[in-house]
Image (cartoon, rainbow, N blue to C red):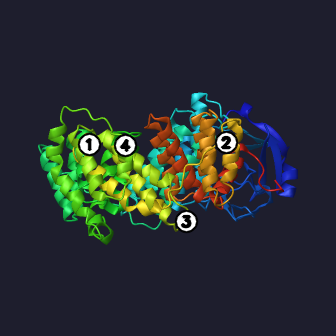
Amino acid sequence: MAAENYVPVCDLGELEAEGRTVVSEDGQAIALFFHEGEVHAVDNRCPHMGFPLVRGTVEEGVLTCHWHHARFELEAGDTFDPWADDVQTFPVEVRDDRVYLDPDPEPTVPPATRWRNRLADGLQENISLVQAKAILGIDDAARSTMDEPDSDGSEPNDDRGDGFRTPLETAVDFGTKYRASGWGSGLTTLSYMAELYPQVGSRDRRRAMFAGVRAVADDVAGEAPRFQQYAFENRDLSKGRLKSWFRENCEVRDEDGAERTLLTAVETLPREDVVEILVAAATDHLYVNASHTLDFVNSALATLEHLDWDEHAAPVLASTVPLFTDATRSEELSSWRQPVDVAELCFDAHDRLEDLVAAGRGERWTEPEGFVETLLSDDPEAIVDALCGAIADGATQRELTDAVARAATRRVAHFATNNEFNDWDTVHHTLMYANAAHEMAGRTDAVEVYRACFDGAISVYLDRFLNSPRAPVPEAGGDRDPEAVRAELLEAFDEQGQVERAARLVVEHFECGGDPAALRRVLGRGLLREDAGFHTLQNVSAAFRRFDGLDDEAERRLALVAGARYLAAHTPTRREHEQTFSIATRLHRGERLHESE
């Protein structure tokens, strides 16, 4: 290091007599220690939570922080405790009984690389504070290369740069490698947070990635690693053959055979053909895994849209295979067989699909008035007949899945709060299935997508008593400042049981001409500050996705009413993770956490 980079900081004799001292250079507090005849300099702030290290203990080359007992190798700063992070050290020299140090040494590892490595550590050890620090560090490193100011979070930024891609890719790589049972709620949460990311402000984008990464770490903790199979060597296999093989292996619950077949399809077929194979297998049985199979596979495909397909498709899609082979099939459940055999109604409709599609070829469907109300009726045969008629009249997969999703949205928007609390999840699952089917219809025009319409609509039918009585969408005036309405909505999430109040405020915001994007930012803030569970994170993000996929203002309003009602039913929480995120943010900014710093 060039001599001109060093600055004098203290007398050697005084340091030797005291054993330690603190100096300040460029506003940074640096702790100096005289130990075993050598001078050492470290950042005075413990990298764990900011305690002044000068108040620590040094024995046999080990510096111990007294707040949480984090230990550091004094010379190079490496920690003994992965939850604490390494402490920065500074080069020192002694000249003429004066101590000199370089206050701005070149980092040995670029910040972006260092923080990505720390994120991997946080995932492996399942340490939420390390994850939060890494998310902030990665985002800050990305901003420094983009010359993008760190806004107050009030405005979203749709640029999904390295602050987005790095956490996503790191967590996906970790989650698909170290969870033997494959793609689960953690990676699905990550996917939903990735879709929420551009809808919220700058600070909440970081919260969204923290929520997704944290969910992956929680889901993987304690799991055995996953060992991926290999594709077949034969590269001349047709889509039809691979599709048949995959479905047959899933049918007999042969995970290894299904995985090898799917990996071969990934390596040899276009993306849209792979999606078709997945949709076919996911709908061979009814409402598989109570919506989770179709929804989780859809989330895996959504995640791949943010990553390089050639690099990530194989491990990501291979991890979804247990969703097919280990699944609960709803035709095996009494609720789908008694008192009305709705499973048989669905299978009969599936068998008719080829003829119905042929009849509708070249036709253009116009949704009849009251079609969604028919889907909400208590007559399953009329529901199936309405769907069959729509296909014969030319309804596309996108059109029909959208209609079913609108019906499922109503089950949440009109959910009667006199039901048991857990019944929120029943209507939630139906909506997730219907939304996944609609998004799948945007990825493939496979005939099998129509099967999800029947399964989703029958699930809507089975949920009918949860709208008895049907909770009305509240009426509200529109003469207030929209900003005041949004502030009150955020306050409503601070108090339990404000379901109808939250719905009314969403309606009022629309009535007074408020910006829907600003409303979604507030809903996002209300969600991300909570210790929100898997279903709540899913539900609000899906409400935003439904909003974006709709043109009719009344339907868009209803989508956000449904999301706000579900969120209000599940808040407030202890906000433990928000406390962790706040600590990480304050440390990142250099703020004090301990009064004696």
C-alpha separation, residue under disc 4 versus residue under disc 2: 29 Å
Secondary structure of the residue carrying numbered label 1: helix
| Crowding near the residue tagged with mark 1, few <14, some 14–19, many ≥20 C-alpha atoms within 10 Å | many
Q: How far apart are marks 4 and 1 (CA)?
A: 13 Å
User: What amino acid is labelled 2 in the image?
Assistant: Arg
Could you tell whether 262 is left or right of 32 in the image? left
Asked if marks 4 and 1 touch (Cβ < 8 Å), the reply is: no
What residue sits right under mark 3 in the picture? 418
N-term-proximal mark, 2 vs 1: 1
Alpha carbon of mark 3 to alpha carbon of mark 1: how far? 35 Å
What is the C-alpha distance between the residues marked 4 and 3? 28 Å
User: How far separated are the C-alphas under marks 2 and 1?
Assistant: 40 Å
Left or right, residue 432 beside residue 349: right
Q: Are marks 4 and 3 in contact (CB under 8 Å)?
A: no
Q: Residue 402 carries which label?
A: 4
Q: What amino acid is labelled 4 in the image?
A: Asp
Of the numbered discs 3 and 1, the one sitting upstream in the chain is: 1
Q: Which residue is under mark 1?
A: 390
Of 367 and 264, which appears nearest the observer? 367
Residue 486: assigned label = 2
* Label pair 4/2, CB-CB below 8 angstroms: no
Q: Residues within 10 Å of mark 3 (few under 14, many from 20)?
A: few
Q: How many marks?
A: 4
Name the residue located 51 percent from the left edge and 44 percent from the top edge: 558
The location of residue 375, given as percent across then percent down, is 35, 51
Residue 210, percent across and down? 56, 50
CB within 8 Å, label 2 to label 1: no
Q: Nearer the viewer, mark 4 or mark 3?
A: 3
